Image (cartoon, rainbow, N blue to C red):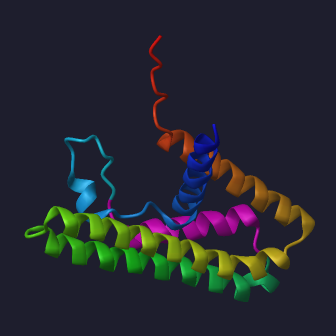
Amino acid sequence: MMTRAFVRTGLAAMTLSAAVLGPPSFGFAADIKPVAMKSTTPMRGDDVEARIKTLHSQLRITAEQESQWTTVADAMRSNAQSRTDLHAEQITAEKTATAPDMITAYAKTMDAHADGVHKFATAFQPLYDGMSDVQKKTADEVFRARVHEAAARQAPAPAKRSK
């Protein structure tokens, strides 16, 4: 029971970051189709720009909040570029990668994704702190909905119990 809570919490954190930052690019692991892993691709610039525009609109960023918003948008762009660069590096190395290399690349990708989430959180907090109560409520709803939607897409199938 406790393990499921940890898994759900982990999935929620990953899906929140995917909702804001885009999906992590798993590099080598993304190409392993026989074990039914979902393929992910690096963030394209137009994807991050669309996400920035949508979030700006949803949060109803005011003229007074634009400087803080710029910090948030820059963090999103930087994170997308970091993932794109890492993905390109992994694609190049993929041709000669061993199993340990692939596992290490996966860990490196997950670390980079977690770093991106922390950077986003650090950039977002001052903006959130300066929001009106109505904007905060909207932000809470937007992120809560994105986490639930992403978690539903990534939730593992329930294990079958034998009797």
Q: Position of residue 19 (x, y in %)?
A: 56, 58
Disc count in the image? 0
Magenta-highlighted stretch: main secondary structure? helix
Q: Position of residue 48 (x, y in %)?
A: 48, 69
User: Which region shows up in magenta?
Assistant: 41-61
Residue 107 sits in which quadrant?
bottom left
For this orientation, the residue located farthest to the front is 163
Residue at 47% over, 19% down: 161
Q: Is residue 127 above or below residue 67?
A: above
Q: Is residue 103 above or below residue 1?
A: below
Residue placed most toward the observer, 36 or 73:
36
- Name the residue: 23% across, 72% down: 90
Picture coordinates of residue 127, whole percent (x, y)? 76, 79
Identify the residue at image location x=60%, y=49%. 6
Determine the residue located farthest toward the right in the rendered image.
Answer: 133
In the image shown, does 118 or 99 lie closer to the viewer?
99
Identify the image quadrant of residue 28. bottom left
Q: Nearer the viewer, residue 138 or 61?
A: 138
Is residue 1 toward the left or the right of residue 104 in the image?
Answer: right
Residue farthest to the bottom?
A: 67
> Which residue is drawn at the image coordinates 25% and 41% (left, top)?
35
**Does 108 sit left or right of 153 as displayed?**
left
In front of the other: 163 or 67: 163
Quick check: is 115 in the magenta stretch? no
